[in-house]
Amino acid sequence: MTQAPTSNTPMTKAHSKANLAAELPKATQLKWLRDMQLIREFENRTMQAYQQAKIGGFCHIYSGQEACAVGTIASVNHDDPIVTAYRDHGHALARGMSARACMAEMFGKITGCAKGKGGSMHMFDRPNWLYGGHGIVGAQTPLGAGLAFAAKYEFEVMKKGVHPHHEPKKKVALCYLGDGAIDQGAFHEALNLASILDIPVIYIIENNGYSMGTAIHRHTANHENLISRGESYGIDSIQIDGLDIRNVYNQFKPFVDRCRENSRPGFVDLKTYRYQGHSMSDPQKYRTKEEVEEYKNKDSIARLLGNLMDEGAITEDGWKQMQNEIRDEVLDAVEFAENSPAPDPAGELFTDVYALPQKNLSPTAEYHHGAKNPLL
Ligand SMILES: Cc1ncc(C[n+]2csc(CCOP(=O)(O)OP(=O)(O)O)c2C)c(N)n1
Ligand SMILES: [Mg+2]
């Protein structure tokens, strides 16, 4: 069997500094503002509902990190698959999940995105190409490589014209992880495989500086140079300031476009900060209030709002109206979650536990049987 040649070398190091965000319509950036504010408001109501014991189990709040999910998801196509860790409400909403389905999932109701069986850490949304929500630190990283491998495989099959109704399409997968996951063995195995097999998966480290209560300099070596982890596998790697959504877009968009075009993996150290504790029960003894305030002064929503106001794209009244609409949308989601029925154990306990192979076949799968693997 002949092995397909690989281009196991990093792509060009010349990263674009173009101001791509400035070329976008203001409506697009107002949508970013809206999406980020929706996540912030959603998380405020989540904390409230948790304190009222309407939400159970582990629950991790995304506030402060909004520009990461919204900025990176805005840089890819809707059908590029994404997968993330347990701090996942923001990714779900940014990907287009309704606030109702997301809130109902946390309330453990049948109307939730995973029929209430997953809860806060397991947001799944197949129509929006979101493959979780994973509670085991680093577990999603081989899955990210698998999603991208599947997309590449399908592209190669379709290129051969075996399926008349599907145009070949180059996709990338986005796989998010925290700074606490970068030393997991599975992650390094995934990086190695992704590089060797030219798999178009972008590993996005949402580096908020803490793994639970452990600061990054206490949990990982060479913490100021995380991109060396990607580079050591021959993977093109960049650091991005994740508190400024325009900056995220300006740097991430050309990066992801190159990975897509060249079918190569990528590694991003996306610097950010979380405002709340690790989970809902965290006395936060490991950091000072001053530190949190320092980051709140660099808030990503306030920054984009300020920019858009300066440019005349939104007024004070327009912002108030946007906030009111979002508040109503989230209150509606809470009411919907409260009024929805719980799953019926008799009907739901054993359904969707194991995948049915027939149900999950891809559109081209019928052509794969007996066919030679197009990647080998
Ligand atoms: C394999 C594994 N080990 C330990 C844990 C316990 N744990 C849950 S979250 C977490 C910290 C992870 O931090 P990070 O990856 O930086 O993500 P963040 O919470 O900052 O988003 C740990 C150690 C786990 N869930 N899985
Ligand atoms: Mg972290």
Image (cartoon, grey):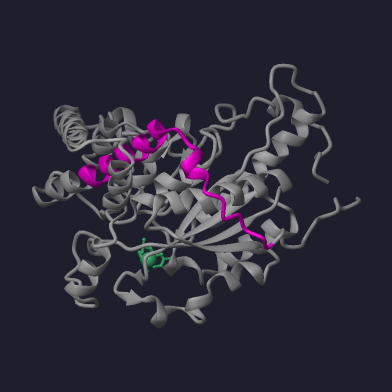
Which residue does the image show at 60% across and 67% down from the upper left? 188
The residue located at (75%, 17%) in the rendering is 164
| Residue that extends furthest to the right in the rendered view of this protein | 2
Q: Is residue 132 shown to the viewer in this render?
A: yes
Residue 91 placed where, x, y %?
A: 39, 45
Magenta part of the chain: 13-42
Q: Position of residue 194 (x, y in %)?
A: 67, 56
Q: Nearer the viewer, residue 274 or 186?
A: 274
Q: Looking at the rendering, which quadrant does residue 206 occupy? A: bottom left
In this view, the residue farthest toward the top is 165
Quarter of the view holding residue 272: bottom left
Looking at this view, is 294 or 112 the one in front? Answer: 294
* In the rendered image, the vertical position of residue 128 relative to residue 201, given as above or below: above
Relative side of 80 to 72, left or right? right
The image shows residue 152, relative to residue 274, as above or below, that is above
Residue 368 in percent (x, y) is at 75, 31
- The furthest residue to the front: 311
* Observer able to see residue 351: no
Residue 116 drawn above or below residue 11: above
Residue 372's spot in the image, x, y percent? Answer: 84, 37
Magenta segment, prevailing SS (helix, strand or loop) = helix
Residue 74 in the magenta stretch? The answer is no
Total label count?
0
**Does 20 lie within the magenta span?**
yes
Along the viewing direction, whichever of 251 and 39 lies nearer the viewer = 251
Question: Is 199 situated left or right of 30 in this image?
Answer: right
Q: Quadrant of ligand 2?
A: bottom left
